[in-house]
Image (cartoon, rainbow, N blue to C red):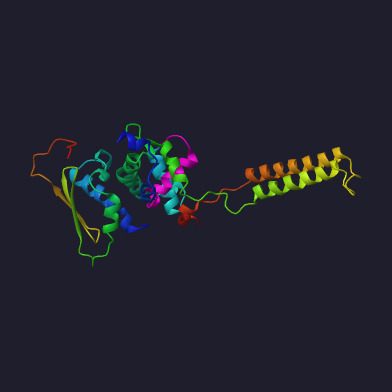
Amino acid sequence: MSSAHEEICVTVSETVSEARDEPVDALPPLSDAIDTDGLDAIVTGDSSHDVTVAFSYAGMAVFVYADSTVYVRPERPREDSVPGAHV
Amino acid sequence: MSSADTEPLTPDGVFELLSNHRRRMVLYYLRTKGGSVDVQELATEIAAMENDVSADELTSQQRKRVYVSLYQTHLPKMAEMNTIEYDKDSGTVRLADRADDIDEYLTTDDQPTYPWRFHYFLLTVGGATALSLTVLSVPGFGAVPLPVVGAAVLLVFTLSVAWQYWQAQNRTEPVPVELRQYDQ
């Protein structure tokens, strides 16, 4: 599509929404969890930059790699089954 | 925090805001449309501009990506800087008063137009000179009656105003330079 790296925030939101099985609209703003302009700037899609960004968002631990790979896992093992858990 | 809300945006804040093309588009669309705009509508319009297709030719994926980026990142950020009023419950946004602070950093659309100030300055000087010379009956000017000179001066001013008005009414607004990358 347009500029691929611009979309990293969208990829993060969609990945977390899928992992939590909640619509994107139900998630808190990603910009509350991380400086999204900063994330855009770091994730260049160039895999020769060995950079990983890790942060927590909506009860998930999020890992973003420089090549735009996004990996998420629940932050705490199991407990937060409360819908819309706040971080 | 409340005192910061009433202070003008800092230059750093303005440029941070303007550093993203989607935020520029949000400002542009809200300014052009005026009033409250539905976030879904905003996302659709921006996706259409970015992809250079009409709104009904957009794929749901194209529209959704813009929606998510507005909803998750740009609108909260703009609301936090008090440049837009973002009503999450009704899903609408509108420009806040503070958005006016941004205007002075952007190009105005009346750039290389006719220098009207200079035009009126010359007219005033010329008209005053003609009237004075007539009143003083300087040789060569006494021949024309004063009311005729007065009427002629008035007529020139009237025509100038009419011309300027016509020009302002018929100006086609170009796509602002800050959005030009999407102009075809």
Residue in view at x 33 percent, y 49 percent: B65
Q: Is residue B80 above or below residue B107?
A: above
Comparing B184 with B12, the one in front is: B12
Q: Residue placed farthest to the top in the image? A: B89
Q: Position of residue B81 (x, y in %)?
A: 34, 41
Q: Nearer the viewer, residue A28 or B81?
A: B81
Relative horizontal placement of residue B115, taking residue B140 as reference (left or right): left
Q: In the displayed image of the protein, which residue is found farthest to the right? A: B143
A79 falls in the magenta region: no
Main SS, magenta region, reads helix
For residue B125, side relative to residue B100 (left or right): right
Residue B25 in magenta stretch: yes
- Farthest residue in the bottom direction? A48
Asked if residue A10 can be seen in this view, the reply is: no
Q: Quadrant of the N terminus of chain B?
A: top left
Q: Position of residue A80 (x, y in %)?
A: 11, 39
Q: Position of residue A7 (x, y in %)?
A: 31, 53
State the extent of the magenta-drawn residues as a range. B17-37
Residue B144 visible = yes
In this picture, residue A40 sits left or right of residue B85: left
